Image (tube, helix red, strand yellow):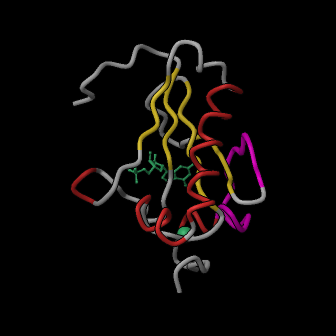
């Protein structure tokens, strides 16, 4: 069912503490941890504790948690001190856009020059 933990989902297993991660912030509804393969000096993933495959389904099924996710992305940027120089929040959606883990996650990227368009 939407929102329920999935035993075969890597990020549900991180939420459950079954897979280790370097956690930088936690709230009642979200967990933020360092990406295992960082693409910038700050590269943190913010995920909801509930399982939804992507940002749009989270926003439709649990809108307050979607808001929590975005607020926490900002809190991570502030905690990492990347907020003054600018940072990027990325929500890859679908395999064709590079999504590899189908538990919604916001990438928070910062700490280096971020060009636009990203390529
Ligand atoms: P996507 O490509 O789906 O937008 O992003 C998935 C991200 O999860 C990738 O940046 C990848 O490096 C990261 N990732 C994959 N497996 C793990 C893991 O076991 N631990 C952590 N911390 N990050 C992971
Ligand atoms: Zn999941």
- 80 or 41: which is nearer to us? 80
Total count of labels = 0
Magenta-drawn stretch contains 21: yes
In the displayed structure, 87 sits above or below 43; it is above
- The residue at the point 65 percent across, 46 percent down is 32
Magenta-drawn stretch contains 18: yes
Q: Is 24 left, or right, of 54 in this rendering?
A: right
- Residue 7 x/y as whole percent: 58, 80
- Residue 59 x/y as whole percent: 49, 62
- The residue at the point 68 percent across, 63 percent down is 15
Q: Is 62 left, or right, of 113 in this rendering?
A: right
Q: Give the farthest residue toward the bottom.
A: 1
Q: Is 74 left, or right, of 25 in this rendering?
A: left
- 15 or 1: which is nearer to us? 1
In the displayed structure, 33 sits above or below 43; it is below
- The residue at the point 43 percent across, 31 percent down is 39
Q: Is 38 left, or right, of 18 in this rendering?
A: left
- Residue 14 x/y as whole percent: 65, 61
- 34 or 32: which is nearer to us? 32
In the displayed structure, 21 sits above or below 80; it is below
Q: Which residues are magenta?
A: 14-27
Quadrant of res 78 = top right
Quadrant of res 82 = top right
- Residue 107 x/y as whole percent: 49, 41
Quadrant of res 102 = bottom left
Which quarter of the figure is the C terminus placed in? Answer: top left
């Amino acid at each position: 069912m939407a929102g329920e933990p999935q035993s075969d989902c890597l990020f549900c297993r991180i939420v459950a503490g079954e897979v280790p991660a370097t956690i930088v912030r936690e709230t009642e509804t979200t967990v933020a941890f360092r990406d295992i393969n960082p693409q910038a000096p700050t590269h943190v993933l913010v995920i909801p504790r509930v399982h939804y495959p992507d940002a749009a389904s989270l926003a439709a099924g649990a809108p307050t948690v979607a808001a929590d996710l975005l607020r926490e992305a900002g809190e991570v940027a502030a905690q990492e001190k990347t907020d003054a120089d600018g940072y990027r929040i990325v929500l890859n959606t679908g395999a064709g856009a590079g999504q590899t883990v189908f538990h919604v996650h916001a990438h928070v990227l910062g700490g280096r020059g971020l060009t636009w368009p990203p390529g």
